[in-house]
Image (cartoon, coloured by chain):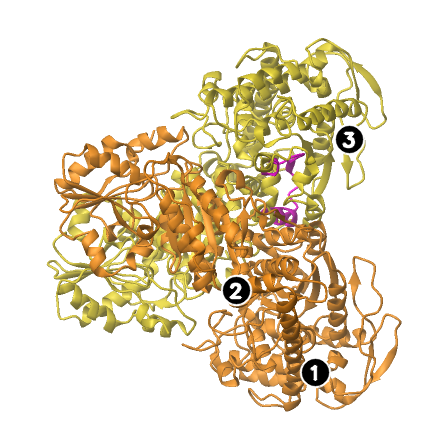
Chain colours: A yellow, B orange
Amino acid sequence: MPTTRSQRATAAVAAGAAATMLKLNVVTSAPAPVASAAPTSAVGASASVVGAGAAALAAAATVRPSKRCAKKEKVVRMATATEVDVDTECINAIRFLAVDAVNKANSGHPGAPMGQAPIGYLLFAEEMQYNPEDPKWVNRDRFVLSSGHGCMLQYSLLHLAGYKSVSIDDIKQFRQWGSKTPGHPENFETEGIEVTTGPLGMGISNAVGLAAAEAHLAAVYNKPGMELIDHYTYTIAGDGCMQEGISHEACAYAGHLGLGKLIVPWQQQAAQASKTAEKAFYDDNGITIDGHTDLSFTEDVGKRFEGYGWQVLEVPEGNTDVDAIRKAIKEAKACTDKPTLIKVKTTIGFGSPNKADSHDAHGAPLGADEAEATRKQLGWNYGEFEVPEQVYDTFSKHAKAGAEKQAAWEKVWKEYQEKEPELAAQFKRAVVDRKLPENWDDALPKVTPEDKGKATRLHSQDCLNAIANVLPEFMGGSADLAPSNMTLMKCTGDFLKDSYAERNMRFGIREFGMGAVANALSLDKTGMIPYCATFTIFTDYMRGAIRIAALSQAGTIFVGEDGPTHQPIETIPSLRLIPDLTVMRPADGNETAGAYKYAVERSKNESRPTMMAFSRQAVPNLPNSSVENTLKGAYEVIECADPEIILIGTGSEVGLCVDAAEKLDKKVRVVSMPSCEVFRAQPDSYKSELLPADVPKMSVEAACTSGWGEFADAFVGIDVFGASAPGGTCLDKFGFNVDNVTSCAERCLSGERGVLSNGSQGKH
Amino acid sequence: MPTTRSQRATAAVAAGAAATMLKLNVVTSAPAPVASAAPTSAVGASASVVGAGAAALAAAATVRPSKRCAKKEKVVRMATATEVDVDTECINAIRFLAVDAVNKANSGHPGAPMGQAPIGYLLFAEEMQYNPEDPKWVNRDRFVLSSGHGCMLQYSLLHLAGYKSVSIDDIKQFRQWGSKTPGHPENFETEGIEVTTGPLGMGISNAVGLAAAEAHLAAVYNKPGMELIDHYTYTIAGDGCMQEGISHEACAYAGHLGLGKLIVPWQQQAAQASKTAEKAFYDDNGITIDGHTDLSFTEDVGKRFEGYGWQVLEVPEGNTDVDAIRKAIKEAKACTDKPTLIKVKTTIGFGSPNKADSHDAHGAPLGADEAEATRKQLGWNYGEFEVPEQVYDTFSKHAKAGAEKQAAWEKVWKEYQEKEPELAAQFKRAVVDRKLPENWDDALPKVTPEDKGKATRLHSQDCLNAIANVLPEFMGGSADLAPSNMTLMKCTGDFLKDSYAERNMRFGIREFGMGAVANALSLDKTGMIPYCATFTIFTDYMRGAIRIAALSQAGTIFVGEDGPTHQPIETIPSLRLIPDLTVMRPADGNETAGAYKYAVERSKNESRPTMMAFSRQAVPNLPNSSVENTLKGAYEVIECADPEIILIGTGSEVGLCVDAAEKLDKKVRVVSMPSCEVFRAQPDSYKSELLPADVPKMSVEAACTSGWGEFADAFVGIDVFGASAPGGTCLDKFGFNVDNVTSCAERCLSGERGVLSNGSQGKH
């Protein structure tokens, strides 16, 4: 049902087509380089020769000549029919796979893929270096779809490119139970997907991490004439990504690092999802598109990115002007010391006569009728899920070139192994095979109860430095708190623009961006073991990144420092709720070493994340603590064969439990539980022996009590916000002292259950 | 112990002093306005007359002439000794209160206040409109210290300005148990503090909200000649605030709104905390200051803010050039359609001969010796906590002027009540008295079980619109998801640059910024009831804002939409852990109305936050559901006097429990528990009657099971990540179907306890 609005949009598109046919719309903020290396052959079926996407606008698939300008010098030449068709057909094939899959699933987002298809086509059929036969080839270009809801773009591209992970049947199963084509791209479901995206802003931040990994590995391993690591990272981002704060953090960091091989086509939509959505409420289809966009997003993104130190390019007509996109990518590659943002203006749902440029194309199927109308508008004479052979041919030609590149790479790698045996061995172990060295953990420090107690953040510093010495793939840093959470590696320098070979990352006060960058180091699948650190309380700022590390199987090691700052009383319990995240709260030196052993092996061998929380205050070294016991999740610190009561502590409260046990005139077992998750995974026999059902058990943790019912009968904790005062005073006032713990233990012994002390006595 | 580094710093400062004496260092990105309204009298003790802060550098307090340029036309004139002394002494008084308090507490951050003192002085002794006798005067200027760790600045200013909340004894109690001067500013502890700050980036985002509140109230209430609301919002931000993603979100939004009365002196430190901290590791005191700053933060913040649509000014020497700051503030005020960022370069720990410009001045006391040396360097001849009378006089003169302004305002207000009785009544009720209208809740919709079931997000839409009609102080919006979470008010338009009187806020895809802005609407203490909405899962992006709403007593209503998107399985349980936050998960229409009644009254009457999660899928209207029952937190949906088992459900799972109860061949009570927190607050008798200890109880919730041990013996939930498929399929596969619930209930009846179904059966 055409409306005034859609009629205008259609007219505008047609006009745009005419207008863009004769110009090359690349606006640059830097001096334009010499005309790019575009092929000059005017005839031929190769997709790499052509770019007359404007012809996609022909209402029927009739053959007709198209003019294009391939060079700045305005050499206008005639494109053959074949040329036009290949470009057009490839782009439309992407569009209609998306349209058909979303229609079949009866849910999903067709609009973004329809607009982004030309960018995706250029990347996967011309620009990107990949080999579908070996999706894990270390030197592949990385691609991230930051606007992950439009994942049918990525599935279409992987399918056309020949990845076995996405067959045409998989595409037909879009968003269905058990399929390889879920509603957002998942790296652990579908080979060829680098990172899970969907939560906006996270993908572009992952891309920064992937580009950082490339820069680092290239600096460490490349030798003259033997460039083991030399590839680009591309990410398509949308307006939403640009609005999210995490994009600020990560992109400012990328600009700071000068990551020249990061290229971001930003799909600046003429109309944005929710903007036009209000039509439904107001029925205001007379409102201009500008009016919609202006609702919340009027910043000059280009200026902002220039402020970050990026190169900013612009493609004013991204729906049809394939050549302009091609040219911009070339220009992006020519700039080697800055990341590049390419503003590509596209139309959501491009090609749909009644839904283009409107919210209707965003998050709902076009429907059968509109799909048919779109076929007519774009001259697409194929059936549902039908892909012309020459489209497959075009993509496979490029994929084959990728396979040849990998073959050439393998030769270089062979030569490298001969000429650089030592580095080659390290590359093979750490990057290719992704294995830890044997007995690597011998490097971890050990303590005895006789050693002077100190803060576990200092034990953490010892461990981290020990690991840094033996594992060159261990890399990371802190969100501007290194001198407090003690996470600087002494054996290496700062990973900065001119020192990519170093490993201390200076993330700045950018927790969320830090988390996403660190996740990407792991998801790069080049064996890196990333860590990132802040105060425990500020994990709230990066919770989205921690959660997705768990969901998408990134082996990030998150380091938090405990302490009174901002009262992180519910922080650790809330992190324990995240599935597949292991939380560690070590009580002393050996438990800290055990936590690191666990975290490093879990990162490298399983690609799974661990969160470790360390103390600011000194804690004693405990009897029985060891790496081995830590790896059980919980164990007896004070042994007692036939206890009357069991005290369970974590971290800095284990010492308190030991002191309380000494004062109690009873048989007391003290259990340290550095990790609930690890303990939960132990054999039932061990669990019931350590914590027998018929012995009263009381937990003691300076955190909220919720969740302790799984292991204990009575709880000492803090369920209220804290206060500002010296740390010892606070702990005392809120009940973390020997008197209160022993008194609660007596109450537990006499049958009281549930929360016995919740800190409310300390409120003033 | 002077080092090469500190010697150089001292020399640079001295040189700077000489250099800045003769110029007015205001660099603007816009055409400079005509010379400001600076007083021209050359003689007099009034602090508003002078600004020769450069003289603060005199090594002794000897009287000496100083030259300054008060106008662009370079009218150089002699300042009298008295002039110099007042400015200098006021600024130094601020500095030394901070130095002495941190020394006495033996913890805290002296460096930032020492650098920010001139800005603070100008604001509190010259620019700001406030009356210490009535800190809640609605038309006061708002001040936010976004870099909250430097709170001794704010305490010093409040004390000098005459706020009774901060006596000199309170300052001596800095950071002590029970004091009015905690380690970060807390609005609920200390009168005169507008918002709690500390977590970086949040304060500047709150300031955006305060400025938005001003713009809205002014647009709604001001009448020609009767401007009830007409004030500025100032916030001092640091480098850290600028790096945090939330500052991007909120400041882009502020630029979009064109909030001309928001003025942000950004304390750009020559050296930043952690940057120089690495000295400790590297002992590299030869490294230049630039080298330190460059570690992670090299963006052009000014360019970025221009991209947002802000005016950007610069004060190159903020330690001493008080006049330049004064001039910049005037210029900021002259620009009425854009917020203004003033880049003020200051030195951390300014005045300390051995610690200025170094990490040592950041987060640790100067110590007695260095305090003494600093006294010498700045010519401060007073003892600890000693404040010269003329400093108090200067501030109280300004405070008195503020009291006079309020008196004038009261006159206007009286006139307003006569001329605009209707609006005046609304202003009095909503803004001044901050009361809800009687029986306001009659407007809330009611349903019966016979009414067709629908998604609670649609019930929410009904409630929200009903409230919008009767409460003009109800204002808010969504992070670009209004058409999905149904949070648009139909009776009002969009709150935008040219329509500040409207109430639908278009936050954009900026969850964290949205949360902080909404919090500030409540903390403005002008009676506004703010709401903000997203998908429930994305509360993770704004968790920092939700938490601080609870901690700092902001009456924000957070609205989430449930549903399969991104698998929010642990989200609601994790929000329940936050102290003083109430989480509501209504099961039908009446529970939705009850949740809104609770949330609105809690916001307006108690200034406390509520989080509400609504369903995407349709749910039936339940027997017994009512507003009254909802306000008990939990109640019987299916009554049963003598139950064999009790099923406890929340939200969309209550209907499932009802269906399961019908199939079970037992006496079953079904309890709906829309809010654990509200139920927890009920009398013990009610709780034990509803959930008797001796009846087996099983919880059913599509979320992780942790925490349910408080109310139930056995649990049906999901402790694993979900999957991508149609919603009904997912629920079924993960065990949320009648068969599984009845089978688990049978197991519970036969004595099984703990997690009976955790969704792992659905993993593929």
Compared with residue B14, is residue A359 higher up or lower down, i.e. above or below? above
- Discs 3, 2 touching: Cβ within 8 Å: no
Stretch of the chain drawn in magenta = A250-276
Q: Amino acid at mark 2?
A: Arg
Give percent across and percent down for residue B30.
Answer: 80, 57
Alpha carbon of mark 3 to alpha carbon of mark 1: how far?
Answer: 58 Å
Of badges 1 and 2, nearer the viewer stands 2
Question: How many other residues sit within 10 Å of disc 2, few (<14), some (14-19) or many (≥20)?
Answer: some
Same chain assignment for discs 3 and 1:
no
At a point 72% along the width and 17% down the height, the residue shown is: A55
- A252 in the magenta segment: yes
Mark 3 to mark 2 CA distance (whole Å): 58 Å
Disc marking residue B429: 2
Examine the rendering and report whether any part of residue B50 can be seen: no
Q: Given the image, on which type of amino acid does mark 3 rest?
A: Asn
Identity of the residue drawn at 41% across and 66% down: A564
Which class describes the residues within 10 Å of circle 3: few (<14), some (14-19), or many (20+)? some
Residue A25's disc is 3
- Residue B296 placement: quadrant: bottom right
- Quarter of the picture holding the C terminus of chain B: top left
Amino acid carrying label 1: it is Thr
Spot occupied by residue A507 in the image (x, y as percentages of width and height): 56, 53
Numbered badge on residue B88:
1
Secondary structure beneath dot 3 equals loop
